[in-house]
Amino acid sequence: MKFLLLIGGSLGFALVFLGGWAVGREPLSSFIQASFGCLAAAVLFRWLGNTYARSVRTVLLEREAASRAQSAAGDTESVSSTQS
């Protein structure tokens, strides 16, 4: 998550600073706005990273539960067929 925070902050700063500079704003004004852009992008990237990680974790847990249910059903069928 730290990596996404750093990437988001760097991208936010660079985009806002270069955008302000391209429009013709003063460098100090662009720098201050880029600082806020850095913070906003870092928080956004962290949120997106957490959401992605939570989704992957959920999918893996669902697959594991389905696999366990399938193997339990297979064990039950093999036990009942050997008893007959």
Image: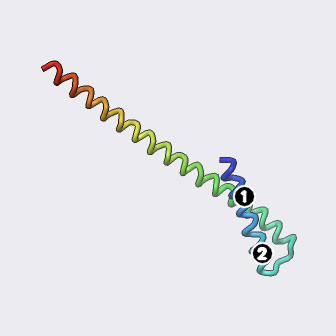
State the residue lying farthest toward the left: 84
Percent x, y of residue 75: 27, 26
Quadrant for the C terminus in the image: top left
State the residue lying farthest toward the top: 83
Percent x, y of residue 16: 74, 69
Percent x, y of residue 1: 65, 47
The residue nearer to you, when weighing 51 against 70, is: 70
- Please tell me whether residue 59 is drawn above or below residue 80 in the rendered image: below
How far apart are the alpha carbons under marks 1 and 2?
16 Å
Q: Amino acid at mark 1?
A: Gly
Percent x, y of residue 5: 69, 52
Asked which quadrant contains residue 22, the reply is: bottom right
Q: Which residue is mark 1?
A: 9
- Please tell me whether residue 34 is drawn above or below residue 68 in the rendered image: below
Q: Amino acid at mark 2?
A: Gly
Asked which quadrant contains residue 62, the reply is: top left
Residue 33 in the figure: left or right of residue 4? right
Residue depicted at 81% across the width and 71% down the height: 30
Q: Which residue is mark 2?
A: 20
Residue 36 in the figure: left or right of residue 78? right
Residue depicted at 77% across the width and 80% down the height: 23
Local crowd size for mark 1, using a 10 Å CA cut-off: few (<14), some (14–19), many (≥20): many
Asked which quadrant contains residue 79, the reply is: top left
Q: Earlier in the sequence, mark 1 or mark 2?
A: 1
